[in-house]
Amino acid sequence: MKTFYRENISPALYAVGFTVILLFRAFSQTHHVFFKRREILEQMFIAGIGSLFVVSIVSIFTGMIMGLNTGLGLRDFGAEGQIGLLLTITLTREMSPFMTSLILAASVGSAMAAEIGTMKVSEEIDALEVMSIDPVRYLVMPRVFGFSVMVPILCIYSSALGILGGAIVGHFQLGIDMMSYFQDVFYRISSIPGLKDLYTGIFKGYVFGLIIATVSCSQGLRTTGGAIGVGQTTRQAVVTSFLMVIFFGYVITAIFYK
């Protein structure tokens, strides 16, 4: 990808502009989705199935930890039976999108940045341009599209496992009836506020998927300095993705629940 750098532009500002433009260029290539379906499915497999085990373990234990701490806190007020309602709100709206996105940023996003960064320093990106192959269409668009589809699905999966983990702890350690617990869960999800929580979580997953994939690809395409540069790119991609996920998570919540 041909880029330019001006002395009067700070590196941080240049990085932001490069990343934003890269995202728009990736969107402009979405009419090639059918022709790149194999690469997109591969990225969906890597982001989804490849991360399923880690997401499953983290989600179920997060639900168990939250359920235990919430139940013990509510027990002082005789309201430990409400943990199903509280966990449903917390997991679908906030925790599941955050957990899933941070896991994917650390595992898949870092690998994505390292892969593209290695291609950049070994001049494979330049070779693609010489052959008149657009790196955005060939490398970036399948990753951005695949990530933005799989992260919301994983958010729903993570919420379900977290709620299940809370049910296990609630039943065996707090003595809460399973039927009553899941009645509270289904009541919340089927209500209008519960649907809003669910849609907010799905939307966050979509935005976080776009952020992680775009930031990782952007860092990879701007890699310089050989093997050391690839290592720095990988670390910077994870750190930037974490910060952007936290920032946009707050912004989305502030917009939807102001």
Image (cartoon, rainbow, N blue to C red):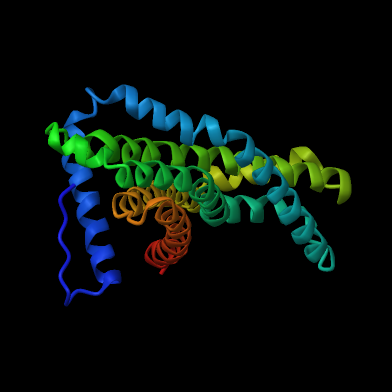
Residue located 44% across and 61% down the image: 249
Judge whether residue 70 can be spotted in this image: yes
Judge whether residue 136 can be spotted in this image: no
Task: Using the image as rendered, state which of residue 34 and residue 166 is in the foreground.
Answer: 34
Task: Using the image as rendered, state which of residue 52 and residue 257 is in the foreground.
Answer: 52
Q: Looking at the image, is 41 positioned above or below residue 20?
A: above
Residue 135: x %, y % from top left = 22, 39
> In the shown orientation, is residue 81 left or right of residue 103?
right
Q: Looking at the image, is 39 positioned above or below residue 216?
A: above
Q: Toward which corner of the image does residue 51 lie, by quadrant?
A: top right
Residue located 45% across and 64% down the image: 243
> In the shown orientation, is residue 155 left or right of residue 128?
right
The quadrant in which the C terminus is found is bottom left
Q: Give the total number of marks visible in the rendering.
A: 0
Q: Toward which corner of the image does residue 11 lie, by quadrant?
A: bottom left
Task: Using the image as rendered, state which of residue 108 and residue 65 is in the foreground.
Answer: 108
Residue located 44% across and 56% down the image: 228
Residue 20: x %, y % from top left = 24, 57
Residue located 11% across and 33% down the image: 132
Residue 41: x %, y % from top left = 38, 26
